[in-house]
Image: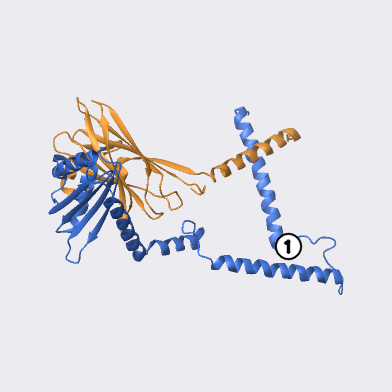
Amino acid sequence: MHGHPFMQARTWAVIGSAAVLFAAAGWGLSRALIGPRPPAMAVAPPGDASMEARIARLEERLERIDASVSRLSSQPRDKRVPGHGAAGLHAQMQQASSPVEDAIRQKRTLAEYEQRFRNQSRTNQWGRDMAVRLTDNIDSEDILAVTSALPASFALDCRTDMCRMTFSFPDSSDAAQWTGAYLATLGESVGRIWSTEIARADGSSDIVMYGFK
Amino acid sequence: MTRIPFSAAACALAAGLAFMAAPSSSEAANSRSLYVAATSVCHVVDPSQADQLRFRHLGIFNMPQGSSVQVACSVLGDYEANTDDGWVRIEARNFRSGPASMNCAVSGGKRAYGVNNYPKTIHLPANGVGSALWENIDRMDVYGHYNIVCILPPNVELSTIWFGQYDDGGMI
């Protein structure tokens, strides 16, 4: 019985691969069970000075390698590559849960954008047009259709190529729904908007946004 | 029993090695893109509007009678991927006899330290399909996630979400 020529070739390919894998596995198993075959000149007679010197050099080299590994282990890891496997995953989880770092990062970004915003000119056509557009969107039909909670108050200011928007909500849980809808309705008006929430102890919150041209 | 010619065995061995070598080349990939129907990754933000939506095998459809509905969709971010060049393509189908538009914002980041949002409008021809592409989405950190919010108009279906990430380290 004859199959398709391609199937025959594939059959031989599979047989060949299996043979190679089987041979490799057998070789590996024999190495693991009985160890590598000793080379003909591996065993030196007792008292061989040259061999003792060679072993001493090897021991010295191993100590240097060991010291290098210890040094590398004590260095802080690159945050992006904590390693692989279970140990790497564990390191990722540990790094991810750092509210203090997140809070520092939020404050740092806020300060950076605020500084950049304050350095910009107030008299700018793009800024004036954008302020009108962003204000119009605050209670647009699209948003009113999909969210019930509106901000209790807001402040909006646009300058050379940035806008700053602050929306206050009595209930911070309402803020996310409105914010998501508001951002979606902005269409092509701004390229990127960085947003963050500043929550207060009484349950209210401010959503602060910086929009970039 | 038929003897196997040496040349045939050699060819089989070479082909076998080639088959074995093929998967290893994909281990060094530096990009990954995934397609998913909106049905499996999007949800209605306000459950009281859920009755207006139909979660179908080709996407989420907002029934003709009714208003726009806010839906939020999450796509998977990879820890190993770059943080500043993710991309998303969204396709939608308009069943109206006239053109329509759908507003969406793709975001990357985390509630704790802030989110980058990228608003965009998808223009949909009458009885046709439209799409929009977001590039260079910056999630700011390897722990940042990606999200999509769309205001789905009536008689429009949010169909396919195509999402991709790059990895300069070649680990994804």
User: Which chain is depicted orange?
Assistant: B
**Can residue A122 be spotted in the picture?**
yes
Q: Is residue A162 left or right of residue B77?
A: left
| Residue B69 figure quarter | top left
Residue A207 position in % (x across, y down):
22, 54
Q: Quadrant of the N terminus of chain B?
A: top right
Label 1 is placed on what type of residue?
A: Gly
Percent of width and height locating residue A136: 15, 41
- Rendered image quadrant of residue A159: top left
Q: Is residue A92 left or right of residue B44?
A: right
Q: Is residue B28 above or below residue B126?
A: below
Res A27 quadrant in image: bottom right
Residue at image location 47% in from the left, 56% down from the top? A80
Chain A palette colour: blue
Q: Give the mark count.
A: 1
Label 1 is found on which chain of the structure? A
Q: Residues within 10 Å of mark 1 (few under 14, many from 20)?
A: few
Q: Which residue is mark 1?
A: A35
Kind of element beneath mark 1: loop
- Residue B54 visible within the image: no
Give left or right: position of B114 versus B100. Answer: right
Query: Residue at position x 39%, y 49% from top?
Result: B77
Task: Looking at the picture, tell me which residue is in the foreground, A179 or B150.
Answer: A179
